[in-house]
Amino acid sequence: MTFLRGTQVNFGKPDYFHLPPKYLDPNPNMASHGLRIAVGGDEAGFSYKDTIKADLEKDPRVSKVIDVGVIHNEDKTAYPHVAVDASKLVLSGEADRALLICGTGLGVAISANKVPGIRAVTAHDSFSVERAVMSNNAQVFCMGQRVVGIELARRLAKEWVGYTFDPESASAEKVQVISDYEAQHHAKGVHEKTA
């Protein structure tokens, strides 16, 4: 077995459920190159997404911003498509993190969490944003345009960029338990469907 960007490769295909021990971040060298952040939202989050995208593009800690849509406020693409597209970029290593915005931040978080290996959270306060990264190693941060004002949303995004997860922290073992549980139950579900 070989490991590629934190994934075990079996039969030529990445297996996101069998991460190397203590290996919790698919892109451990992100600090050396600046963060690559996927941004996305539906029509209910379009305005905030574009404003925060512009902020991220000016942030020296960010090397690349990848916009997965929607591209205008009349675009009716359902938020699950946007959330899954952004999450897949994180898993593939094309992005280090993702920031998603819909009306409440809840739908995009639920959708992103359906992508195996992704930890997405909805947060609307500084402490939760901090703990999302530092305690839970969440790669995807979600917000609701109908929940917080734009200035708070911009501030939270700026704070989020500054946090990093310590794989030697006490939280690392807990995050590994989440990954192990996901691997065990996903494999069981796949096996049951094919049996």
Image: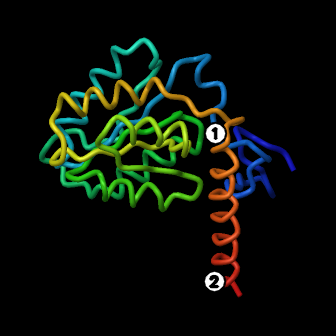
Residue placed at 49% from the left, 28% from the top?
Answer: 163
Residue placed at 64% from the left, 39% from the top?
Answer: 26
Q: Which mark is residue 25?
A: 1
Q: Which quarter of the figure is the C terminus placed in?
A: bottom right
Q: Is residue 89 above or below residue 106?
A: above
For disc 2, the marked residue is 193
Mark 1 vs mark 2: which is more N-terminal?
Answer: 1
Residue 45 image offset from top left, x and y in percent? 21, 44
Q: Is residue 133 left or right of residue 146?
A: right
Frontmost residue, 71 versus 102: 102
Amino acid type indicated by mark 1: Asp
Dot 2: within a 10 Å radius of its alpha carbon, few (fewer than 14), some, or many (20 or more) residues?
Answer: few
Q: Is residue 56 left or right of residue 15?
A: left
Dot 1 falls on a residue whose secondary structure is loop
Dot 1: within a 10 Å radius of its alpha carbon, few (fewer than 14), some, or many (20 or more) residues?
Answer: many
Q: CA distance from mark 1 to mark 2?
A: 29 Å
Q: Which mark is residue 111?
A: none
> Please, which residue is most extreme toward the left here?
74
Labels 1 & 2 near each other (Cβ < 8 A): no
Residue placed at 40% from the left, 59% from the top?
Answer: 111
Residue 173 image offset from top left, x and y in percent? 70, 49
Residue placed at 44% from the left, 31% from the top?
Answer: 37
Q: Is residue 8 left or right of residue 69?
A: right
